[in-house]
Amino acid sequence: MLHPFDDYPVHNGPEPLLHLRSDSAGVYDRYFYNGFDAEGRVFIGVALGVYPNRQVMDASFSVLIDGRQHNVRASRHAGRDRALTKVGPIEVTVVQPMLEHRVTVDGRLGLAADITWRATSAVIQEAPFKHVVDGRTSFDYTRITQFGEWSGWIEIEGRRIDLAEFGRVESARDRSWGFRNGVRGLPGPAHDHQFHWFWVPTVLDDRYLHAASNDDAQGRPWHRSGAVTARFGAEVGDTEAVLDDSRIIRATSTTVDVTWQTGTRWPTSAVLSLATWDRDSVQVVYEPLLRFQMCGIGYTHREWGHGTWKGEAVETYDVLDHGTINPLDSQMLHVQMTCRATYGSRTGIAVLESLAMGRHDPSGFGDSNGAA
């Protein structure tokens, strides 16, 4: 099964590029973007994923403003050409790899958008994600994180919003591929859906910090990643610059300490500690300003979970009123929070992503997803 990309010298094995080396249903390849302003007035979330062994491509676009989260989701049969990254009204276009992407929503469901993401940092390749449970691989994937800025407009139910109204709209995007949840659906005893996760991209005036953290149920770490990199200046537009790994200062240790909001599994504050080989430890304090529900773009959503077969072509639009949310609904555990970040005498803006699903002994969380 050949593809035009097979004409490039980029193969890592004898098979054509579209030939999959695993028959796991968990094989995936995904784009994710967020967008946030310094005052916590608006939040954007975008996801587009391909699940080749399920023959599914899905996408979602969500914007939170004035306490209401507007969500467009779509899913379709993924045919032979996975490079056609358009699902229903949503399209993601790589204008220049690692430098400029464009996201559009055509408005047929009441929400329209035409926004462009441009890189402002080098690409951070995070530490490998591999987790083995009882000898079976549950997660094995690569993730990159990169900072950027958004421009363009969004129209919600007839209201046109120019992103310039919010000043600089920052973004941390990720690309990940491999497979997730490899043991789900396999024969044998049921496995708890335990996942304790933080992802913390932080924007300061001249640099970016990044951290990611996974624990098992007993609090033992199985993934830690952290980095510091500079905000681009005149280098913007230079592919070699964004791929220059020497611009990334890797953390030798990463710790995220969270205080949980009473009666929830949402953070009320956090402290990030990063140690690097060539400088003193970095410590940043986070104060949440705005909470975005990740179910708006499919994460943990009961009906629109990623990779779910919905049909040949299906799409939907809904609005989530943040004043009516049950914080212990399993769909609502996964959040990204715009935060004020304080680093010594300096302040910045950040996103604190958390998903505390299932048991985590150090936090006092049990298997039932109730609060501590």
Image (cartoon, rainbow, N blue to C red):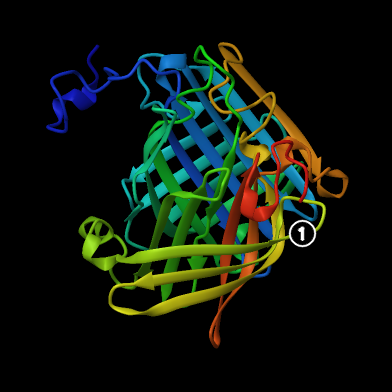
At label 1, the amino acid type is: Gln
| Neighbours of disc 1 within 10 Å: few (<14), some (14-19), many (20+) | few
Place of residue 57 in the rendered image (x, y in percent of width and height, measured from the top left): 49, 23
Name the residue at the right extreme.
Answer: 324
Report whether residue 41 is seen. Answer: no
Place of residue 87 in the rendered image (x, y in percent of width and height, measured from the top left): 52, 26
The residue that appears at 56% across and 28% down in the rendered structure is 306
Q: Secondary structure at mark 1?
A: loop
In depth, the one of 98 and 220 nearer the eye is 220
The residue that appears at 44% across and 67% down in the rendered structure is 209
- Can you say whether 212 is above or below 95 in the image? below
The residue that appears at 29% across and 73% down in the rendered structure is 277
Residue 59 occupies quadrant? top right
In depth, the one of 357 and 122 nearer the eye is 357
Place of residue 283 in the rendered image (x, y in percent of width and height, measured from the top left): 50, 76
User: Is 285 on the left-hand or right-hand side of 1?
Assistant: right
Q: Can you identify the residue that label 1 sits on?
A: 261
In depth, the one of 8 and 333 nearer the eye is 333
Residue 262 occupies quadrant? bottom right
User: Is 108 on the left-hand or right-hand side of 313?
Assistant: right
The residue that appears at 12% across and 32% down in the rendered structure is 9
In depth, the one of 216 and 147 nearer the eye is 216
Place of residue 367 in the rendered image (x, y in percent of width and height, measured from the top left): 69, 37
- Can you say whether 334 is above or below 89 in the image? below
Report whether residue 293 is seen. Answer: yes
User: Is 150 on the left-hand or right-hand side of 258?
Assistant: left
